[in-house]
Amino acid sequence: YLEAIKHRLSTSDGEDKAAVQSVLRTVFLKLLQMLSVFTPHICEELYARLFDGKPWRSITISPWPSAEHRYDEDVKKGEVLMETIASIRRIKHDLKLPLNAPLSKVKIYAGEYCDILKEGESDIKGTLKIAELTIAREGRGKYVVEEYPQISYDLEA
């Protein structure tokens, strides 16, 4: 997830950037809450500096974080997106391309996942530095996303 949103922190502004920052803040707070059991001093220091003692005066008295199941569908969409990005990165590595090397063209054949990948198109393009990205429902590419075999793709460096 961090790899996929990193580009949004540096290139986005306004609402999109604020949304990413809010998610990262929430994740970091929940992580601090869980780690405070094992490393209370450093977690307390980070909490005081980054969260200014709000909403609790001490991280050690905060309630244990719980999963928010209202996002279950978004989590599934995120998994599809992350696995697709990871698969393309693996192929870049196998082709001996630097991971930060731009790709001129990528065509993804997504089947039932087409709408999900179209929703995350800007994250795919930004993370993988793709100049031209096409996402189609039908077709078959040379490379397959291992975790989602219905998704395949072709790429040009």
Image (cartoon, helix red, strand yellow):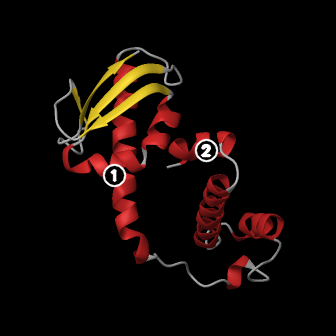
| Residue 109 picture location, percent across and down | 23, 35
Question: Real-space Cα distance between discs 2 and 1?
Answer: 18 Å
Q: Which residue shows up at 34% across the image and 24% down it?
A: 91
* Label of residue 97 in the image: none
Q: Which residue is drawn at 29% across and 33% down?
A: 108
At label 2, counting other C-alpha atoms closer than 10 Å, the crowd grade (few under 14, some 14-19, many 20 or more) is many
Give left or right: position of 131 versus 45.
left
The amino acid type, in three-letter code, at marker 2 is Arg
* Dot placed on the residue nearer the N-terminal end, 2 or 1: 2
| Residue 8, x across and y down, in percent | 61, 44
Judging from the image, what secondary structure is the residue with disc 2 in? helix
Q: Position of residue 77 (x, y in %)?
A: 35, 56
Relative to 14, say whether 97 is above or below: above
Give the number of marks. Answer: 2
Residue occupied by mark 1 = 116
Q: Which amino acid does label 1 sit on?
A: Ile
Instruction: Tell me the quarter of the picture where residue 69 sits.
Output: bottom left
Image vertical order of residue 38 relative to residue 157, above or below: below
> How far across and how far down the image is residue 28, in percent?
63, 62
Name the residue tied to disc 2: 8
